[in-house]
Image (cartoon, rainbow, N blue to C red):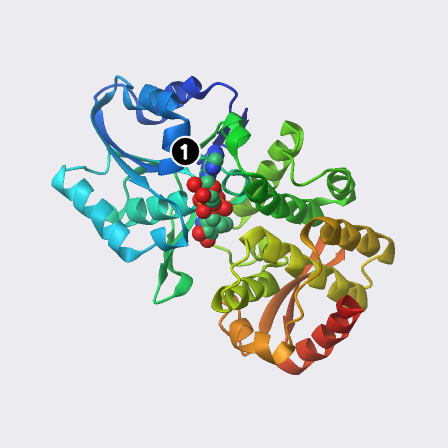
Amino acid sequence: MRIGNKNPIYVEENLLNIFKFLRYHIGTHQKYKCLILADELVASIYENELNYLINYPYFNHVRLLKYNVDENVKNIDNIKNIWDTLSNDKFNKKDLLISIGGGTISDIAGFASATFKRGINLVIIPTTLLAMTDASIGGKNAINYKNIKNEIGTYYSPLFTYIYPNFLNSLPEIEILSGFTEIIKHALLNNKDSVREILNLDPRKLPPISILKKSIQFKHHIVRIDPNEKNRRKILNLGHTLGHCFESIRFSNHLPTSHGICIAWGLQYTIKISEYLLNFPPYWSKKIIEWLQTWYGKPPKIKFNDLLPYLLQDKKNSDDKITFILLYAPGKPKIHKFNIQELKKIYDKCFHDFAS
Ligand SMILES: NC(=O)c1ccc[n+]([C@@H]2O[C@H](COP(=O)([O-])OP(=O)(O)OC[C@H]3O[C@@H](n4cnc5c(N)ncnc54)[C@H](O)[C@@H]3O)[C@@H](O)[C@H]2O)c1
């Protein structure tokens, strides 16, 4: 299945079909070099698959760099090392960089390929649920800098993204749960039917392929109409303003908590705030919050004043206002700007609800 024309996403049940798309997008008139950046764990589980790829006959030189993945991988030293490899091996813009892994690997691959010679060919092969539904779509990439997450990055789209859902069969439950919050987020932004479908699912288990495809299509549609996040794409931050704050606070308090769980907490606040300010239907609010709490728990008891420094750091803020995505109803988002006092008042009200 192909999604989109420009920088398409292919969802395929046979990994070897990737060769067809390499031929289509890069051609066969001459051989070229390839640098593969791979998650070490993925490379060990899927050694045979990786070997098939390495032996693609149109590669005349292949290098493989493997990473033991954690958040620290997204650093400038690793980027320099990739630049050095590309430079020493005389890669040019027509050569290829391939990422195989989750969002951590696609972020360093995206950043390195965007910057080397102002952009060399990139193909992303995501292997986590989060990367398939979110990180590999839309061309954003970033590395962490001076302990700030995603501080430096670019927009740079791959030639194509190749989704082979079978990679998900080895994904641990916690990573499935974490990736699932992007699926519920897309459903909330899409429409009631999509939400209804998700509320019947257990997010510790892989979603049906139809739901995976719908989620990918939704994100692709939004980023296609607003690639540089000037307007419509901002809605994809649903649940993320507070979710990112929870993530940073838990990290500083030595209680690191997965991105997805923090976003699920952020979504609970978002729904409650939407109910108070925009009359989000209580019927849906109750159902969605119950589902989120069943699988992800209640949001942590963090006072507004402890959140504020993190809220003020958000890249999406402007004019001293804090940008929030709210919902009138499933499928009806609103970009809302709060001043600090307004936000404190409504946050405290929800805090009280969640504490009871
Ligand atoms: N650029 C974007 O648009 C964007 C969007 C969302 C998130 N991100 C970034 O993505 C990163 C998180 O990525 P992620 O959640 O995909 O996870 P990840 O890449 O950090 O990997 C999580 C864990 O899953 C393992 N893993 C990966 N694929 C596997 C598989 N198929 N089987 C078994 N184990 C596997 C990894 O080894 C690792 O232990 C963060 O750094 C975040 O900032 C970027």
Query: Quadrant of residue 31 in the image?
Result: top left
Q: Residue at x 74, y 60 (%)?
A: 271
Q: Residue at x 63, y 43 (%)?
A: 183
Left or right, 323 with reference to 201: left
Q: Residue at x 29, y 47 (%)?
A: 112
Instruction: Give how far across and how far down residue 91 sits, in percent.
Output: 18, 37
Q: Nearer the viewer, residue 192 or 83?
A: 83
Quadrant of the drawing holding the N terminus: top right
339 vs 164: above or below: below
Q: Residue at x 78, y 65 (%)?
A: 278
Instruction: Give how far across and how far down residue 73 sits, in percent.
Output: 35, 51
Instruction: Give how far across and how far down residue 198 sits, in percent.
Output: 73, 40
| Residue position marked by numbered label 1 in the rendering | 42
Res 335 seen here = yes
Left or right, 322 with reference to 313: right
Q: Is mark 1 within 8 Å of ligand 1?
A: yes
Res 339 seen here = no
Q: Nearer the viewer, residue 340 or 44?
A: 44
Q: Nearer the viewer, residue 129 or 61?
A: 129
Considering the numbered disc 1 on the image, is that residue within a helix, a strand or a loop?
A: helix
User: What kind of residue is marked 1?
Assistant: Val
Instruction: Give how far across and how far down residue 231 sits, in percent.
Output: 56, 58
